[in-house]
Image (tube, rainbow, N blue to C red):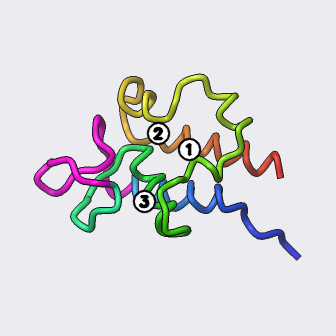
Amino acid sequence: MTKPLPLGVKIIRKAKAYLKKGWTKNSTARDAKGMPVPADDPKAVCWCGVGAMRKASIFYTNHEDWIRHIPDKVFLTRPMSLIAFNDNEAQNVDQVIYRLEEMEKAILAST
């Protein structure tokens, strides 16, 4: 029998799906006109890494506090926060998705 996936992994996988639909910087989400909107706004068409995690957390838990589902030691291995990485370092969505995949692997390795 396989173990159920940790909630943090489910959130990350859902967030990656949102990012594949559309990615942005300097706002948690944007509508089709490029205007900033909340991550869970139905008009949102693209998200930053944190916005995608917030929207995915709401999908699974009805609240946006995604960070409590990610073990502390996952963050300790990544010196730059997800928001700073998304907005300052990442050149494209694939780099943000790769960062989320690293977080996912760390969670799976710790369970």
Residue 40 coordinates in the image, percent (x, y): 34, 62
Residue 92 badge: none
Q: Disc 3 and disc 1: Cα gap in Å? A: 14 Å
Q: Which residue is mark 1?
A: 100
Tag 1: residue type?
Answer: Leu
Residue 8 coordinates in the image, percent (x, y): 64, 55
Which callout, 3 or 1, points to the residue nearer the camera?
3
Q: Does residue 49 show up magenta in the picture?
A: no
Does 11 sit left or right of 2 as displayed?
A: left
Does 11 sit left or right of 88 as displayed?
A: right
Tag count in the figure?
A: 3
Viewer-proximal residue among 94 and 18: 18
> Helix, strand or loop at disc 1?
helix
Q: Disc 1 and disc 2: Cα gap in Å? A: 6 Å
Check if mark 1's residue and mark 2's residue have beta carbons within 8 Å. yes
> Which residue is at a point 52% across and 30% down the rendered structure image?
81
Q: Disc 3 and disc 2: Cα gap in Å? A: 16 Å
Magenta stretch bounds: 20-38
